[in-house]
Image: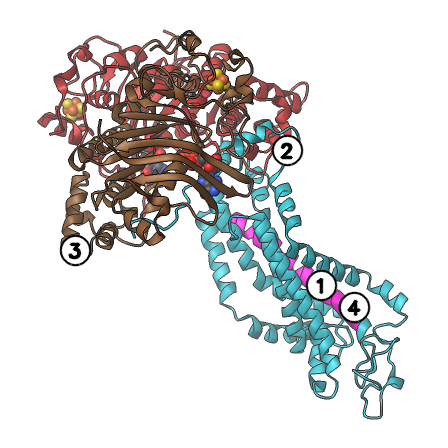
Amino acid sequence: MTSPLLKVEGLTKEFAVRGGPPVQAVSGVDLSVAPGEAVGLVGESGCGKTTTGRMLVRLLEPTAGSITFDGRDITHLRGRALRPLRRDIQIVFQDPYGSLNPRHTVGSIVAMPLEVNGIKPPGGTRRRVQELLELVGLNPEHYNRYPHEFSGGQRQRIGIARALALNPRLIVADEPVSALDVSVQAQVVNLLRGLQRDLGLTFVLIAHDLAVVRHFCQRVAVMYLGKVVESGDREDIYAAPRHPYTRALLSAVPELGEGGQGRIRLTGEVPAPTDPPSGCRFRTRCWKAQEICASAEPELVPRGGSRQAVACHFPEPESAHAEGEAAHGAAG
Amino acid sequence: MSVPYLRVENLTVRLRSSDGVVRAVNDLSFSVARGRTLGIVGESGSGKTVTGLAVMGLHDPRRSEIGGRILVDGVDLQALPEPERRRLRGGDLAMIFQDPLSALHPYYTVGRQITEAHRVHQKGVGRAAARRHAIDLLGRVGIPQPQRRVDQYPHEFSGGMRQRAMIAMALVNNPKVLIADEPTTALDVTVQAQILDLLADLQREYQSAIIMITHDLGVVRQVAHDVLVMYGGRAVEQGSAAQVLGDPQHPYTWGLLASVPTLRGPVAGDLVPIPGNPPSLVHLPGGCAFHPRCRFADRTGGASRERVPELLPSGQAGHLAACHLPAADRRAARTETGVSA
Amino acid sequence: MALPAEVDLNPAPPPAEPAAPVAPEVAGRSPSRLAWARLKKDRVAVVSAAVIVLMLVIALGAPLIEWAYGIGPYDDFKARLDRFGMPLGYAGGIDGDHWFGVEPHLGRDIFIRLVYGMRTSLLIATAAATLTSVIGVLVGLAAGFLGRWVDAILGWVMDFALAMPFMVFALAVVPTVALRFYGPRDDIPPLFRGVVLVGIFAVFGWTGTARLVRGQVISLREREFIEAARAAGAGLGHMLFKQLLPNLWAPILISFSLALPSYVTAEAALSFLDVGMVEPVPDFGRMINKSINYLQSDPAYVFFPGITIFVMVLAFNLFGDALRDALDPRSSR
Ligand SMILES: Nc1ncnc2c1ncn2[C@@H]1O[C@H](COP(=O)(O)OP(=O)(O)O)[C@@H](O)[C@H]1O
Ligand SMILES: Nc1ncnc2c1ncn2[C@@H]1O[C@H](COP(=O)(O)OP(=O)(O)O)[C@@H](O)[C@H]1O
Ligand code: SF4
Ligand code: SF4
Ligand SMILES: [Mg+2]
Ligand SMILES: [Mg+2]
């Protein structure tokens, strides 16, 4: 196996809240991303995906844990030392309206990373920007237009072009298509797939849409309440989810096609991240919970010889999906 | 088949905006029987919300022009004086919005908003009785500890809870017609599943006619009996869910179906997007509004660019589609898009 | 009250967005260009702008007008007064030579003094509005973007400035400052007076702009385009002046255009109260101060400076409102 481009261990972020316990947004996330790979980070809103993503691109300072990029510890780089890293790791945002400065032309938006890093591309900035626009499927002649003159999907392309300007090696994309219509979403997913294939880019894709992740990522990590509960290869996760939460999440997606796994309905709400449950954080909604789930926290480790890591004391058997209705039931 | 309770005939909605007249809905007809659900699908900006608001009578009369007939139980709403319409609204006719904050008042407790909606429409209901009913409803829509929650403000509720509170408010008078405008789009799938189940339960109990507006074909497949596909403010395909999703007849529907990423099946190839963007309803393309994005536009001998296709029977009985593509060529064309019957 | 009578669920339909890319022209229509187009369509804006431009031309071209008119602001025409010192003729001595008549007792020409008074007034108001805007923007940017202790300290200073009573302060400080530099009998140069006035306005006037800018910056700070710049390695200067400032022009221009008329009136008020400009410099406040004594005997003397200042302030205010509507169309209607 090649050595990972990005390795995250025990990554933790707590937000201090005035007059209350801290928000435990991310609690000990482990992640490893090989070069050229796309890893999906999925989970319901509030589970800490965005916070994790912002820590990876060093927009947020981790409370604990380490981030290693290309063999170098970058967890606490600051100021000048951070500069070269900024070129290697870039981010694409969710909001096609908020992520582009409404007062800047498309040209200056895409050129911004070059400008702030004092980079003069051979052939000139304008040439380079127009190349980038072409790369993401936009008309390079629209260089002088403003964001409000573009549709949501086109704006997302502009954001992607900006992220590509510095020739990064890793792109963290935070819900890049969730604000788009399906028809347009497919355009952008295809664009990202093309970039991964043609430029050998490495991606961390953050999304709550499991189907989108399935179409883009080779590996998947499922988060619940600040923790990764299951991770593994796409084929395994979707065909044979072993964590009860992953199963519930997959079965909740309304599907176009026939069949599917037995329907599992989670009841109740995700507990507050200020006061997560002891032991397994999913136990308040888990239909398999036992006493040990409240007292001991399950580790995220491969179980039963597979590559799929599960943080559960009672994981589903490897061929759980075959049984269908077996685990049908409400939370205890 | 049951008699339609809500009938919309040739609905047209024009809205005035700073860019010009928005031709938001054009010649739209549909009907929903009690106990049935009609799914309206289409990309954003296709006129779905405007349709829902028109049925509710919520468009500002100074800035809109509404044509056609909206019949509820045989009564034409357009002909009703405004006070009577208002009585229907929130009573027999209720709407759930995508953004609960736009419908919930921030300065009143959730309970108060529900009880007022109740007492406005049902004279003689006492304060205490209304409150009991509100608590009961909040419990029914799955809000834990309803006795405590009833006295909280909307901002104290999570997103999923707010959506439930709004549903409770919409249901307080047992509406016979419920319009749900993307009620779960902003929610997580697990919460969405709960809400869809809840709506199904309530429909079974009260026999409401539901219009489910959504852009998620998966949701449509799960809840709708009938489906209306909108594009550019028009119906392009209409029929039972089995017909529209199982034997789609319109190239736009094919495009929608092909572009949806799935949890099963091959992932080796790219998704098949619909090229371009949805049109502006101020400057609609002439002819078939879909023609700039349609890969089959050239196979209609120029008709796609010249004439708006009529909504005609196509496929099985009761199935309508608006496309110039000759019926004989449809199946072959659909196979090209990768959409199977 | 189950539902609001009308709901606008699309409060901001992105203006015809899918149509835009089809539009033939390739040059971008910037937000400011759009605002300009809206402004040009607004009749009130056009008329008030014309009045403002006219007054600016008059103020700037005062010496030229003096030359063409043939009378200076300090020339006196005692011969045009009767033995009580009142102007001869009707309506304060209006005739072909003295369009607005002459001052009682001093016999100076009112028209040319108004022309020069406008110059004084606009000069001081513009200087004060510019200075307060610059201070306000800098403070607002720093407080809003840096937050934490910077915001706390600046907020405290702002509250302090707001808590001081403006008039009392002005009445107390102007004579004190003047005494500090000049003897009680010295002639205080008008320039010094003007600088002190602008200084006082600056001390008090920046808080409004600063608050406005701070609020805007706080809401912009969370926007993802700021994060994008940070993720690309942008420094503080780039963030403040390249990313944030271009988004602040609208509030800055609006507050500037509404500050101008308030400084015109404030300057006139202070001069009226003898703590602003002093004789013989032509000034609206001074003119009104003196003319008040002749309210009965020579109403024309009050009328001309009064109506001029009224029209001026009205034009500025109307234009400021129109500007706001044009820059931020959602706030109107
Ligand atoms: N700046 C912040 N201050 C306090 N809490 C925060 C902050 N940012 C995020 N959170 C909280 O951290 C948790 C994780 O949030 P986030 O990472 O945005 O989740 P996701 O992206 O998965 O929806 C949420 O409970 C959220 O409310
Ligand atoms: N109040 C309004 N005034 C003017 N135009 C509007 C108004 N509401 C919606 N529109 C326009 O009507 C079109 C259809 O909108 P809508 O029904 O909300 O679409 P959908 O719900 O299918 O996404 C859009 O182009 C939208 O911009
Ligand atoms: S550890 Fe226990 S509570 Fe947690 S997911 Fe597994 S069975 Fe459920
Ligand atoms: S009418 Fe023509 S353009 Fe429209 S959907 Fe049919 S084939 Fe396509
Ligand atoms: Mg997020
Ligand atoms: Mg809508």
At label 1, the amino acid type is: Leu
Q: Is residue C206 above or below residue A109?
A: below
Q: Secondary structure at mark 1?
A: helix
Evaluate whether residue B37 shows in this view.
Answer: yes
User: Residue A199 in magenta?
Assistant: no
Question: Dot 3 falls on which chain?
Answer: B
| Position of residue B178 in the picture relative to residue A80 (left or right) | left
Residue C122: mark in rendering: 1
Q: Viewer-nearest of labels 2 and 3?
A: 3
Q: Which residue is mark 4?
A: C115
- First in residue order: circle 1 vs circle 4: 4
Q: Which residue is mark 2?
A: C28
For image coordinates 67% across by 22% down, the residue present is A124
Question: Label 4, label 3: how many angstroms apart (C-alpha)?
Answer: 74 Å
Q: Viewer-nearest of labels 4 and 3?
A: 3
The residue range painted magenta reads C113-142
Would the CB of label 3 be found within 8 Å of ligand 6? no
